[in-house]
Amino acid sequence: DSRDLQRARTKRPRASWKGDGHEDMVKVLNGHLTQMFPKVKPCSEWSVEQLQALQAEFYTSRHAGFDAVYQTGADRRVMQQGSMGDYEARWAELNKLAGNHTGRREMLRDGHCHEAVMWLVHHVPAADQQGWFSRMHVPMLSPKRHTCEEGAGEEDLKLCAAYDSQVTCADCHSGAGIPFQDPTDDPPFPDDPTPPGWNRQR
């Protein structure tokens, strides 16, 4: 759908898709998720392994043309690995670092929730979002913003870096990210009446 590619080329979310800081941004975006997908589930109710399996499904259903658009500029929606095999190797490394440590696994899980939602909304075509994935459970974003304390060990720092690379929503959707920009700068999008609003989704 040409509207999907037009949306991929749009880097500035409308004001209704932005929040003031991490918690407000999460509240705003989770509100949109509940309207877009009938079966949303809080991030805390997912395991790391469940989220990784879900992301593998999203990856298989992605439209490579979207990532080609993101690759042309400094766009944090870009896929960070070159293949599913690369992601699986990366996830195995992170799972090993997290081990059975409650705090580490929580941070890893929350990062996957953010990344999974980004993949679904910005890499999977709207037709598939409204079709197969509308019948599946979809994670919500975690309101907690994880950080590493000063003096954190090497393993914690690696997990923090991975988390920061996954929580890219704030770059555009939060006042703590890039400066708020006027959404009227963007060309108007024809709305899809079934259901309305799907053409922008950000």
Image (cartoon, grey):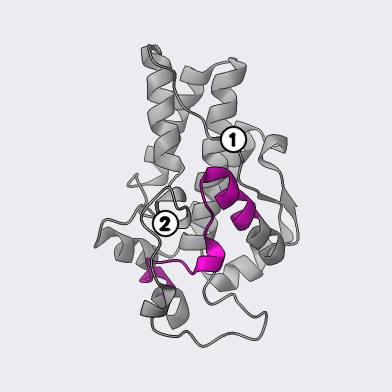
Q: Earlier in the sequence, mark 2 or mark 1?
A: 1
Q: Is residue 46 left or right of residue 160?
A: right
Q: Going 35% across and 52% down the picture, which residue do you hit?
A: 76
Circle 1 Cα neighbour tier, 10 Å, few/some/many (<14 / 14–19 / ≥20): few
Tell me the crowding category of disc 2: few under 14, some 14 to 19, or many 20 or more residues within 10 angstroms, Cα based. Answer: many
Q: Nearer the viewer, residue 53 or 191?
A: 191
Q: Can residue 11 be seen?
A: yes
Residue under numbered circle 2? 172
Q: Is residue 26 left or right of residue 8?
A: right
Residue at point 47%, 56% (across, down) = 173
Q: Amino acid at mark 1?
A: Lys
Residue 193 pos. (x, y %): 65, 86
SS category of the residue bearing label 1: loop
Residue at screen point 54% across, 48% down: 116
How far apart marks 2 and 1 lie (CA) works out to 18 Å
4 relative to 27, above or below: below
Instruction: Inspect the magenta stretch and tell me whether residue 100 lies in it.
Output: no
Q: Residue at x 38, y 66 (%)?
A: 181
Query: The magenta stretch spans which residues?
Result: 7-30
Q: Is residue 202 visible?
A: no
Quadrant location of residue 7? bottom left
Element type at marker 2? Answer: helix
- Residue hosting label 1: 144
25 falls in the magenta region? yes
On the image, the x and y values in percent for residue 196 come to: 64, 80
